[in-house]
Image (spheres, grey):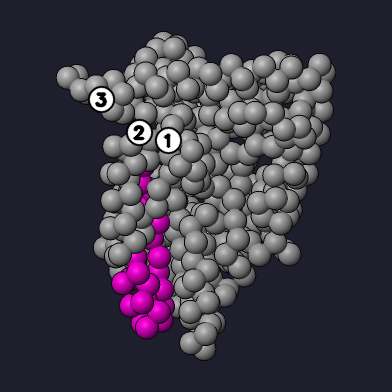
Amino acid sequence: MDQSVEITLYSDISEISEEDWNACACPEIGDGERAFDPFTTHRFLAALEASGSVGPGTGWDARHLVARMGDRIIGVAPLYVKSHSQGEYVFDHGWADAYERAGGRYYPKLQCAVPFTPVAGRRLLVLPGLEEAGGRALLAGMAQIAEGAGVSSVHMTFCTEDEAELAAEAGWLPRLGQQFHWFNEGYESFDQFLGELSSRKRKALRKERQRAQAFGGEIVQLTGDDIRPEHWDAFWQFYQDTGARKWGRPYLSRAFFDLLHEMREDVLLVLAMNGDHPIAGALNLIGRDALFGRYWGCIEDHPFLHFELCYHQAVDYAIAHKLSRVEAGAQGEHKLARGYLPVATHSAHWIGNEGLRGAVAEYLEAERAAVDEDIEVLTEMGPFRAPSGGSDEQA
């Protein structure tokens, strides 16, 4: 590591000033702009800690990195000590099992990530113009901390492709994943977007939206001051129901949603209302150029309502606000039929033990080839019309 850069660890993000953190994480907000990535802002990460969603007893203990050059903070990274592999969405349970069967100790490990958030973005948060030097310093700092503490591994998940390449140059193992994103090709309306789909897919989505919107109430999009505290009471019910079915227990605490209310100008809450009562909802965060779908839940089941609130309403919002894309979270090939296309996601992994490292490297090589092939096949299966000269029904 460059000796002119000093690395310091902090166990609470409140020990790092919001100004210093955001200067590295989202310098664009200094000009009054919305952050490109709302999840790496100081206030979002601080809300996770202040609400008890991460911290003692959760298996996510903060060890945020700060890189200084002299008295100047040039880079930061969200880093956590993990005692399990939950809430990460890049799965390494098999690695842990194999290592522990061989007599190793996989946990604790270090995780450079935004907890519970499978959204790709920068993880090596460095001042503009110092990305390469600062990024290398942060990567080297993580590896040195892991070696010094006897930690098995460090995992930088949902990072950018450039960061994954920088990490690979430093000896980390690159990993490829897949998500489904919707891209705005300058559409003026949802109907114009539908016009790009094959006839069969277009008819199916129109019918799906009609059935969803006929649930007996109305669908509302709320952001900013239109979101009231009672909306969070309703959404907490939705979140608990979904969390109990998917994860066993919800990752986020009720207090987190009260803190999220304080940043409601960056929130889009889509609710299905039966009179004055919300019966289903989808939570999105708004970035400067993208809408990020996060959570969904309901207390009544209605056909296709999940697809309407999570995917079609998000597309409506992105078109109306001229956002370039909708990122709808992890997994879900059902998104393909709704115009969301497969894209690659990136992670990088530092592993201390030579034997485990060799086994994981071999696995990841085969996995990358499989993911590349999957993306190619799924893209060809997408709902969009065939190029000019082909049948409309081929797509």
In the rendered image, the residue lying farthest to the left is: 389
Report the side of 257 relative to 197 (left or right). right
Report the side of 43 relative to 244 (left or right). left
* Residues at marks 2 and 1, CA–CA distance in whole angstroms: 6 Å
Q: Which residues are magenta?
A: 343-364
Mark sitting earlier along the chain (3/1): 1
Residue beneath label 3, please? 386
Task: Please determine whether, in this image, residue 353 is positioned above or below residue 140.
Answer: below
Q: Are marks 2 and 1 in contact (CB under 8 Å)?
A: yes
Q: Amino acid at mark 2?
A: Gly
* Magenta region includes residue 108: no
Residue nearer the viewer, 350 or 269: 269
Q: Residue at x 36, y 82 (%)?
A: 354
Q: Quick one: SS at disc 3?
A: loop
* Residues at marks 3 and 1, CA–CA distance in whole angstroms: 15 Å
Residue 148 visible in this rendered orientation of the protein: no
Q: Quick one: SS at disc 2?
A: loop
- Quarter containing the N terminus: bottom left
Q: Residue at x 70, y 50 (%)?
A: 245
* Residues at marks 3 and 2, CA–CA distance in whole angstroms: 10 Å
The circle on residue 382 is: 2
Q: Amino acid at mark 3?
A: Ala
Mark 3 neighbour class, 10 Å CA radius: few under 14, some 14 to 19, many 20 or more: some
Residue 141's x, y, as percent? Answer: 43, 66
Residue beneath label 1, please? 336
Q: Amino acid at mark 1?
A: Leu
- Quarter containing the C terminus: top left
Q: Are marks 3 and 2 in contact (CB under 8 Å)?
A: no
Mark 1 neighbour class, 10 Å CA radius: few under 14, some 14 to 19, many 20 or more: some
